[in-house]
Amino acid sequence: PMTIQTVPSTDPANGTRLTSVKPGAITLVRHGEPALSRRVKLDSAGYRNWWAAYELGGLLEGQTPPRPVVDSALQASVRYASTRKRALETARAICGELCFQPDSMFIEAPLPPPNFPSFLKFSPGTWGVIARFWWWAFDHHEGQETRKQAEARAELAAAKLIEDALTGQNVMLMAHGYFNGMIGLELARRGWTCVHKGGFKYWSRLRFEKKA
């Protein structure tokens, strides 16, 4: 059943009358295309350095946010962004003069590559798949955030977004593809339905609503 948030409409000292509020929607947006080139072949050490640069870098110039994403920002009363530069630049491009709140809770899950022999060289995209599988299946984290820790963080992130949405406000998060997916799984586990599946490409969005 739909969770209904009740908010006081009068002073409790004078007798509070409770009003039902329909939960707002939660929209998860992936950042725009980063400036760092993927047109390289790297060994595992090279990819480790590439990912470190990717985490610090911003967006490729000349991009325009899709209109539906901008419209979602206009409709939202609460807007969050990851503190990574690519996410912050995405938020500024989408929100314009609208306010948003940076929060490190929403940064991407780490991608440390396994230590393959140096003669094995792949593109960053291929390394990303390999590194994510090793992190997910074998808990390969190199002292960074583990899968279990990331899952716990995704639970906290989902709870934060839900708390805002249950007050009747539309909520938007501008962050990262994989961690957005982890949050989406947690939202679904808590009874939220994905009503718009925009995939995980740059500037894509997922919209969740609490159904009756």
Image (cartoon, rainbow, N blue to C red):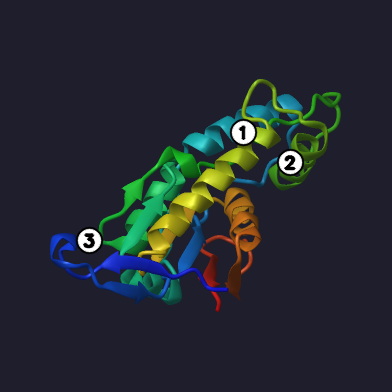
Q: Quadrant of residue 11?
A: bottom left
The kind of residue on which mark 2 rests is: Arg
Q: Which mark is residue 50?
A: 1
**Is residue 183 something one can see in this rendering?**
yes
Q: Measured from the top left, where is residue 45 in percent x and y?
A: 71, 24
Q: Are marks 2 and 3 in contact (CB under 8 Å)?
A: no
- The N terminus appears in which quarter of the rendering? bottom right
Q: How packed is label 2: few (under 14 Cα within 10 Å), some, or many (20 or more)? A: many
Q: Which of marks 2 and 3 is nearer the N terminus?
A: 3
Q: Measured from the top left, where is residue 126 in percent x and y?
A: 76, 45
Q: In which quarter of the image is residue 144?
A: top right
Please determine whether, in this image, residue 58 is positioned above or below residue 48.
Answer: below
Judging from the image, what secondary structure is the residue with disc 2 in? helix
Foreground residue, 42 or 145? 145
Q: How packed is label 3: few (under 14 Cα within 10 Å), some, or many (20 or more)? A: few
Please determine whether, in this image, residue 142 is positioned above or below residue 180.
Answer: above
**Is residue 35 something one can see in this rendering?**
no
Q: How far apart are marks 2 and 3 (CA)?
A: 36 Å
Q: Measured from the top left, where is residue 59 in percent x and y?
A: 45, 50
Q: Earlier in the sequence, mark 1 or mark 2?
A: 1
Q: Which mark is residue 97?
A: 3
Q: Which mark is residue 132?
A: 2
Judging from the image, what secondary structure is the residue with disc 3 in? loop
Foreground residue, 109 or 25? 25
Q: Do the residues labelled 1 and 2 touch (CB within 8 Å)?
A: no
Please determine whether, in this image, residue 207 is positioned above or below residue 162.
Answer: below
Q: Measured from the top left, where is residue 202 in percent x and y?
A: 55, 60
Q: Which of marks 3 and 1 is nearer the N terminus?
A: 1
